[in-house]
């Protein structure tokens, strides 16, 4: 009996696999089989959004697991995905690749799928953990319920809290223990039954890269030099190489293994492109600041925010700040919803998925109630004006691409996206500031110095195929899984199988 094993690792980066390749013998073995497949993530390339697409084959505008801040909701923010966990389950239940496999009579084992909680009925076993990471109030749940009681003796919830400087070593050990507990449980469950489909997900590597990026990347301006944490990211890639090798040892020649990630990882932008200031200068955003001096209370408030952010970075208080924001969410709302902007009189404003940490992607939301021209004409005007924005010193174009939201995706939940979406050069994030230069420094880089990348996700497969497509997207994973499982049902999804011809020419990875 042949089976399909899928290992999903959050934030695993193809460039880092190449960089550490000589220390990763199992990754290297798979790369030799299919060396040139380039996997691109969705937009936005957040984990919840990306994994939901992997599970369903649907673009985010169709599955709806996507969050962009609505800037015209003054001092409010869209509910976080963590708060909307039950809503995510409601949207995904019944339409994932393991649900279709179950309906087709395939026996499935699904371990810790990201953003899915609690478990639901499948033809086999499903074990889920909450994104809230509280084992007391949100215990690990399974179908059937006896599985979690029988097989999970330790706390295997994701490590959610951010470390302080005094708890970094403990944080690393907790993440490491989680990975090895996942390996142990995964191998037990793999050998427990004759599965047609086996899926296991791990999140610890993404968390480690977020927190320790600047300790490991000497190209990061905040790199402290030789330090005790400089190899921690490579260490976790080695742990995942061990995971990969452990599962490969349990396979026979008829089995197939897929290893994939939802996005890549790199340095979070150090610089900001201040879109709100550009909108203000063009008369599309109304500011309450009348005098750029100490006599204007709104100007003072914005300066205090900048000075406070700079103070946090200068004195290494980023970890404490992140915890404070978690405890008192109103501080995040105040930071991201500028009191100096007159929302009722503004026509357009910058939008992104977070507001505190800098992202290289975002959008422009339009207040149609204040438009004095045709909506489509205005969007075309903004795209023309902003697409050519360049760095004032280097002259380099700052915008990789910009388009209307419906040119990116189509779907019931398209309205969750800003009216215009774009991606910046990787070195720049979306800035919210007004009465500031076009380019400014990001004072929040150290809160999480590592950030997601769209174009360096990982796709590896244990069999060599003729005519496999070299450029694929996350939407293509779902139909590929169903094809490998020989499920013939016609299913509506946005991707297509990666196999141009369904002809395997080699399956030996041992």
Image (cartoon, grey):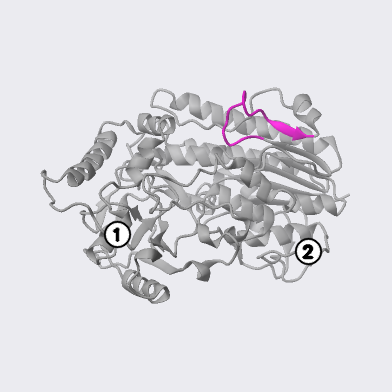
State the image coordinates of residue 466 (x, y, percent, origin top left): 73, 68
Quarter of the view holding residue 24: top right
Q: Is residue 89 above or below residue 290?
A: above
- The region drawn magenta spans 129-143
Q: What residue is pinned by disc 2?
A: 504
Is residue 225 visible from the viewing direction of this image?
Answer: yes
Residue at left offset 54%, top offset 47% = 11
Q: Is residue 219 above or below residue 205?
A: below
State the image coordinates of residue 214 (x, y, percent, origin top left): 38, 41
Q: Residues within 10 Å of mark 1 (few under 14, many from 20)?
A: some
Q: Nearer the viewer, residue 250 or 132?
A: 132
Residue 345 - label: 1
How far apart marks 1 and 2 lie (CA) works out to 61 Å
Residue at left offset 67%, top offset 59% = 57
State the image coordinates of residue 19 (x, y, percent, origin top left): 49, 50
Is residue 21 visible from the viewing direction of this image?
Answer: no
Quarter of the view holding residue 129: top right
* Disc 1 secondary structure class: helix
Q: Residues within 10 Å of mark 2 (few under 14, many from 20)?
A: few
Q: Nearer the viewer, residue 119 or 298?
A: 298
Q: Nearer the viewer, residue 267 or 370?
A: 370
Q: Nearer the viewer, mark 1 or mark 2?
A: 1
Callout 1 touching callout 2 (CB < 8 Å): no
State the image coordinates of residue 178 (x, y, percent, origin top left): 61, 30
Give yes or no for residue 224 being in the magenta stretch: no
* Disc 2 secondary structure class: strand
Residue at left offset 72%, top offset 52% = 96
Give yes or no for residue 139 being in the magenta stretch: yes
Q: Earlier in the sequence, mark 1 or mark 2?
A: 1
Q: Mostly what secondary structure, the magenta segment?
A: loop
65 on left or right of 225: right
């Amino acid at each position: 009996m042949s089976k399909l094993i899928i290992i999903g690792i959050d934030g695993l980066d193809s460039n880092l696999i190449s960089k550490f390749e000589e220390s990763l013998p199992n990754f290297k073995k798979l790369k030799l089989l299919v060396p040139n497949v380039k996997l691109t993530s969705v937009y936005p390339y957040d984990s919840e959004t990306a994994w939901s697409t992997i599970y369903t084959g649907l673009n985010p505008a169709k599955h709806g697991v996507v969050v962009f801040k609505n800037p015209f909701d003054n001092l409010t923010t869209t509910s976080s995905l963590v708060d909307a966990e039950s809503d995510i389950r409601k949207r995904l239940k019944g339409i994932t690749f393991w649900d279709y496999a179950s309906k087709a009579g395939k026996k499935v084992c699904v371990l810790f799928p990201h953003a899915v909680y609690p478990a639901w009925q499948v033809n086999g076993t499903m074990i889920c953990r909450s994104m809230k990471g509280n084992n007391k109030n949100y215990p690990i749940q399974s179908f059937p319920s006896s599985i979690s009681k029988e097989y999970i003796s330790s706390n295997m919830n994701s490590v959610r809290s951010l470390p302080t400087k005094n708890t970094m070593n403990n944080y690393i050990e907790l993440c490491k223990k989680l990975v090895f507990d996942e390996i142990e449980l995964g191998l037990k469950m793999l050998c427990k039954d004759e599965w047609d489909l086996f899926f296991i997900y791990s999140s610890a590597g993404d968390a480690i890269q977020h927190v320790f990026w600047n300790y490991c990347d000497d190209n990061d301006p905040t790199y402290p030099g030789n330090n005790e944490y400089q190899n921690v990211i490579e260490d976790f890639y080695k742990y995942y190489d061990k995971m990969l090798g452990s599962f490969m040892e349990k396979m026979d020649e008829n089995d197939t293994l897929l290893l994939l990630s939802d996005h890549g990882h790199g340095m979070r932008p150090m610089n900001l492109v201040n879109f709100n200031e550009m909108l203000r200068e063009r008369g599309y955003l109304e500011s309450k600041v009348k005098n750029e001096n100490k006599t204007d209370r709104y100007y003072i408030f914005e300066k205090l925010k900048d000075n406070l952010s700079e103070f946090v970075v200068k004195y290494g208080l980023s970890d404490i700040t992140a915890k404070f924001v978690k405890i008192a969410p109103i501080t995040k709302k105040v930071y991201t919803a500028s009191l100096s902007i007159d929302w009722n009189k503004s026509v357009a404003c910058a939008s992104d998925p977070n507001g505190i940490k800098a992202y290289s992607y975002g959008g422009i939301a339009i207040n149609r109630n204040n438009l004095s021209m045709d909506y489509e004409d205005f969007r075309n005007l903004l795209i023309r004006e902003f697409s050519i924005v360049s760095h004032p010193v280097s002259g380099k174009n700052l915008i990789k691409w910009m388009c209307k939201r419906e040119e990116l995706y189509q779907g019931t939940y398209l309205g969750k996206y800003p009216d215009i979406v774009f991606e910046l050069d990787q070195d720049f994030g979306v800035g919210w500031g007004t009465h500031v230069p076009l380019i400014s420094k990001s004072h929040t880089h150290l809160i999480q110095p590592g950030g997601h990348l769209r174009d360096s996700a990982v796709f590896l497969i244990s069999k060599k195929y003729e005519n496999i497509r070299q450029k694929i997207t996350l939407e293509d994973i779902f139909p590929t899984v169903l094809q490998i499982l020989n499920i013939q049902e016609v299913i509506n999804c946005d991707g297509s199988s990666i196999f141009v011809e369904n002809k395997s020419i080699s399956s030996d990875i041992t």
